[in-house]
Image (cartoon, rainbow, N blue to C red):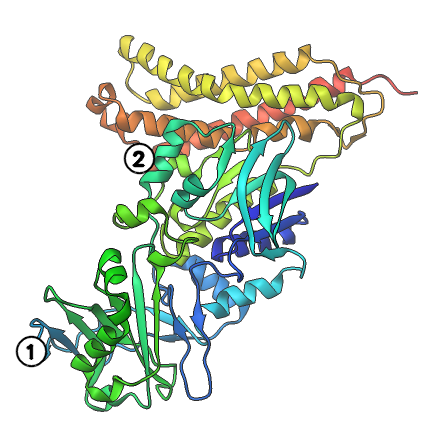
Amino acid sequence: MLDTLIVGAGLCGLELARRLEAAGRSVLLVEARPRAGGRVDTVPAAAGAAALDLGPGWYWPQSQPRMVRLIADLGLETFPQHDEGVVLHLRQPDGNPETLGSEAIHNGARRLVGGMAALTGALLRRLSHDRVRTGCTVRRLVARSDRVEVQCIGGGESFVIAARSVVLALPPRLAAEQIVFEPALDAPLRQAMQDQPTWMAAQAKAFVRSDSAHWRRGGLSGNAFVSHPQAVLGEVFDACDATGEAAALGGFVALSPALRAASAPALELMVRSQFAQLFGPAVEQGELHLRDWAREPMTCSALDLTEPGGHPEDDVSLLAAPYWSGRLHLAGSETATRGAGYLEGALDAAARVAARLVAVPLALPPSPANDGSVAEFADWVGALRDQAGELYRQSVVRALSAQRSIDMTHAVLCAVIDHVYAEALRRIDALDFDLSGVAIERGRCALTPSLLAPFSGFSDWLVGEALQHNRTSCALSNFPDEHAPSPDYVARIRHDLALAWRAFAQSLNQMLVDRMPVRG
């Protein structure tokens, strides 16, 4: 059985697969599209023609350290987004563009030689050849006591893949819309998934190649804005290669998804005309590439189409927590703690989930005599989550009634986790285990990892539940330090919960060791 199945071969899925494979985990990456890369999609460079990024094309070194490190690790070449020259502004549908000065507008953005597909392609080449399966659509996830069964469709047939854990490295709205979960996800999580907009889902990008970057010779940067109500392109930028010899312009389409669909037969002509109005007739007949992400069912959900929303929100705790006793994880850029929606966010999510999965020891298969008890304990831990969340909420009410407000969240969470771990030890003590054939190595019982595995990510989930409750509690709105805890306060809570986890793991292992028969 696989250790981990990753659904979605975008940047997050590829980076996560690379990390897990490097850690010795068995991993499979499935992708519904016929290609890997997700929203990273590049028209390849050709002789004298620049590579064109139909999806994300920029990264910002000063604020995106994960991108900087990965690009350096992979040995990829980069160059600055061209920003030198005059910026144009078109205010009237039938007017001429005016100048806005020559200030750089892309804030130090850089691009990759060969386009962003150079990044995903390099990650793909780092994986074993059998780690990725494209054209494979996931329809249903079914949680079992020791695994998740993933029902897929691909190659004209239906099949099931079993894995100890599953990671959904795709936009939360898509997962909520396209995948059936058994058991069903709880209402707050589904709402959080639906509330988080998918970045780029309602956008469209257009590029036109040119024989030369004549705008540069004329002192123009290639940057332009169109602000009148009939705008076809809202923002235009220079899309030449690193040398400037392979010339192109790019732009973001200003029309809504509905208007783009209504004007589809004439859209290419309208885009060409807008480029020409800004930079002259020399670009009007160039090779045009247009990508409407709203027409991509593996990017744009029905909710994204009808309620496009704004930029995804960072650090949505419900999207970052593990579920199904640590066997189900949400990933993808929209689940990031930092940089949600950006490539940096995809790497942030990959790092978060990889650290969580690698931290769980590879369990030695318990003897068949213990399978039932291990499965029973895993089911008990799964049912414990709702109880723990409710216990936290009740304990907060009691703390407020006792007029305790200083460090209340910290105190209540520590008390709840202590109660949970004490109950877990009592539960294990009451279960029957046949330890006669179970190995012990350097003081650790081989059964210990199997019993700890259902708790993977439990404390992170509990902290997320607590913070979500605090943010929405009217009673706590009078206590700012608890209503919206500072990062330092949350870090202290996580530190103390980690100490409690360590003590619990040691106690659980010692309980098993003490029960092992004496061997002569």
Q: Secondary structure beneath disc 1?
A: loop
Q: Answer whether residue 184 is visible to the viewer in this image.
A: yes
Report the Cα–Cα distance between label 1 and label 2: 51 Å
Q: In which quarter of the image is the N terminus?
A: top right
474 relative position to 81: left or right = left
Q: Residue at x 56, y 21 (%)?
A: 381
Q: Residue 486 carries which label?
A: 2
Q: Which of 123 and 68 is in front in this view?
A: 123
Q: Secondary structure beneath disc 2?
A: loop
Q: Are marks 1 and 2 in contact (CB under 8 Å)?
A: no
Q: Residue at x 45, y 35 (%)?
A: 321
Q: Nearer the viewer, mark 1 or mark 2?
A: 1
Q: Which mark is residue 15?
A: none
Location of residue 400 with respect to 232 vertically, above or below: above
Q: Which amino acid, mark 1?
A: Gly
Q: Position of residue 477 (x, y in %)?
A: 21, 24
Q: Position of residue 173 (x, y in %)?
A: 38, 43
Location of residue 72 with respect to 453 vertically, above or below: below
Instruction: Say which residue label 1 marks.
Output: 95
Q: Which amino acid, mark 2?
A: Ser
Q: How many marks?
A: 2
**Badge 1 density bin: few <14, some 14–19, many ≥20, Cα 10 Å:** few
Q: Nearer the viewer, residue 275 or 312?
A: 275
Q: Nearer the viewer, residue 55 or 119?
A: 55
Q: In which quarter of the image is the C terminus?
A: top right
